[in-house]
Every structure is written in C-alpha cells, then in structure tokens.
Amino acid sequence: MAKILELPGLSGKTVVITGAARGQGYAEALVLLASGARVIATDLAETCPATLANAAAKLPGELHYAQLDVTSETEWAALAKFLKKEFTQVHGLVNNAGIPFRGRIGEIARADWDSVIAINLTGSMLGIQAIAPLMRKGASIVNIGSSAGLNAHHTVAYTASKWALRGLTHVTATEFGPRGIRTNIVHPGYIETPMTATAPAVMRDAQLALTPLERTGQPEEVAAVVAFLLSDGAAYVNGAEIPVDGGFTSSAGVKYMSDIIKASQQKK
Ligand SMILES: NC(=O)c1ccc[n+]([C@@H]2O[C@H](COP(=O)([O-])OP(=O)(O)OC[C@H]3O[C@@H](n4cnc5c(N)ncnc54)[C@H](O)[C@@H]3O)[C@@H](O)[C@H]2O)c1
C-alpha cells in the first residue's frame, strides 16, 4: 500500500464518495479522512465494511456510511435529503463507482451494455443531479474516468461509458462554473484493485509493456489526485482531464515502437 498523503483545506468538509467499500473508492475515503474531512462513504452493501470502519477509527476525519446503488434515483434522493438535514451543504462528490465488462462488440449482450452504461455513466449523472443543489461556491465534483476513455480499449461498453463520462464532465464544468462549482475527471491507468484482480494476466502484461513508468499504479496514487481536485489548491482547475496512468495514454503505444527500435540498435 502506498503512503496516504494528507491534503490541507479539506478538514471538516463533507464529501460523498460512491463505490467506497474497496479499491480506489476506499483509498479516496482514507486520504480524505486523513485530511480531516467528513466522508459519506457509499456502496451497494447494507452496512459499512469493517475494513473501512476500522481504518477510519484511526484517522482524524468523520466517517458516515450509506447504502447507495448509483443507478437508483430514489436512493440518491434519500441520501440528498439526509445530507441536507444533517449537514446543510456538501463540498465534494466523487463519482467513483464503476464496473468493467470485458466483452467486445461481437460478444456483448444488450443487458450487459445497459448495466455498464447505467452504473458508469447514468449513475454519475444522477449523483450530480442529486448532490449539486447542496453545493455552494468552492465545491468540487470529481468523476472517475479511465484511460479507456482516452483510447480504443476493446471493452466496448466500458470504453463508451468512460468516453461519455468525459462529455458529462465538460457539460457540468461549463454549467456549474458560474456558481463556483468545479468539475474534473481523473483517468486511472492500470491500478491494483479488486477490479483489475479479475483481469486476465496478459492484459496486465500488455499494459505494463506500454506504460513508460513500467509499473502498475496503487489506489492511493489515484486518491491523492482526487483529493487535490477536491481541495482549494485546485481552485482554478475546472473541466480538466487528468490521466493517472504512468504515462500510458501520453505515450499512445509509442513506447512499444521505441523499445523495439532501442533493442534492434543495441543488437548492432
Ligand atoms: N482499477 C483500475 O485499473 C481502473 C482503471 C481505470 C478506471 N477505473 C475506475 O475507477 C473506479 C473504481 O474502480 P476500482 O478498480 O476501485 O473498482 P472495484 O471493483 O475494486 O470497486 C468498485 C466499487 O464500486 C461498487 N459498485 C459497483 N456497482 C455499484 C453500483 N451500482 N452502485 C454503487 N456502487 C457500486 C462496488 O461494490 C465496489 O465497491 C471505477 O469507476 C473504474 O471504472 C479503475
């Protein structure tokens, strides 16, 4: 596990995170709690995972847990009602919940396409609709995209959902900018979480071969960037897309070509 960095200016701020039970959402909750924030961790399970509750007990921030399926408007409305009553306003929303579906165009069933779009895209839009009315000047929305949203990753529904999430991000940044609410999107590369633990080993190897830093990422490395975007340090950052991928998308596959050329030159 990478070091959890604490960020200034987040103490006492109320931040909602979706899909916070594990993986990157869990790491985002910890970095915010370490920074003294009030974290509203949400996920599908009815009760807060013991790992999260135990970790939170050692950190200065305040943890609340709520069961929330991001595709449910009713559950978003109930959460917004609770937040308004208890805390009046919300500083941050991290639309982190997401699912992969590793099917190609010829393989994906309509139901699987629909569920990926519902969770990865519609869930984020419903979250913004429900929580933005509780936000004031200085608030921040962070969507979790993917390097797949910047290229043609074969997982068609996942890739399409993350490209569309970029569109949602830019519309929200434009629409809410005049209210002083910022919206940005972070694009993780290959991060070691339960999601990637189910990916075929060859996929990990292929991504490593194309990543200039030549290693995978840790959830805490994504969480640190998310926390920065939530903080006042990012006060003038709105509508930005930030890859956290070891240079994978920046290199655009050219690392492969460069390595082959280097190897052939070394043989001479
Ligand atoms: N791990 C990576 O390499 C990687 C790369 C790029 C993007 N991402 C994105 O980062 C985000 C987090 O990924 P992760 O690797 O931590 O995944 P993960 O599978 O480890 O965790 C995802 C969490 O989302 C929750 N979730 C799933 N469906 C939900 C729903 N309908 N409502 C609420 N919660 C739901 C799960 O219960 C789980 O706790 C996702 O949006 C993912 O697409 C991950």
Image: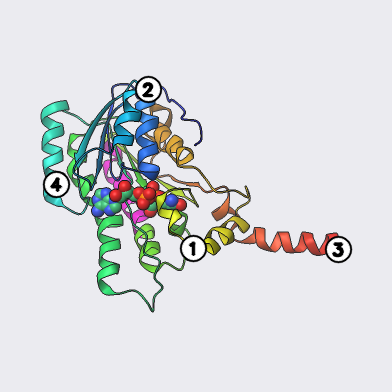
Q: Is residue 81 left or right of residue 223?
A: left
Q: Secondary structure at mark 1?
A: loop
Instruction: Pick the quarter of the image with the C terminus.
Output: bottom right
Give the x, y percent position of residue 52: 32, 34
Q: Are marks 4 and 3 in contact (CB under 8 Å)?
A: no
Q: For the residue carrying disc 2, how many other residues have a C-alpha within 10 Å: few (<14), some (14-19), or many (20+)?
A: some
What residue sits right under mark 2 in the picture? 9
Residue at the spot x=43%, y=44% of the render? Answer: 240
What residue sits right under mark 3 in the picture? 267
Q: Which residues are magenta?
A: 164-178
> Quadrant location of residue 155?
bottom left
Q: Which tag, 1 or 2, sits closer to the chain's start?
A: 2
Tell me: is circle 4 under 8 Å from ligand 1. Answer: no
Q: Is residue 98 left or right of residue 199?
A: left
What residue sits right under mark 1 in the picture? 200
Is residue 176 highlighted in magenta? yes
Identify the residue at the far bottom of this view.
106
Amino acid type at circle 4 is Glu
Q: For the residue carrying disc 3, how many other residues have a C-alpha within 10 Å: few (<14), some (14-19), or many (20+)?
A: few
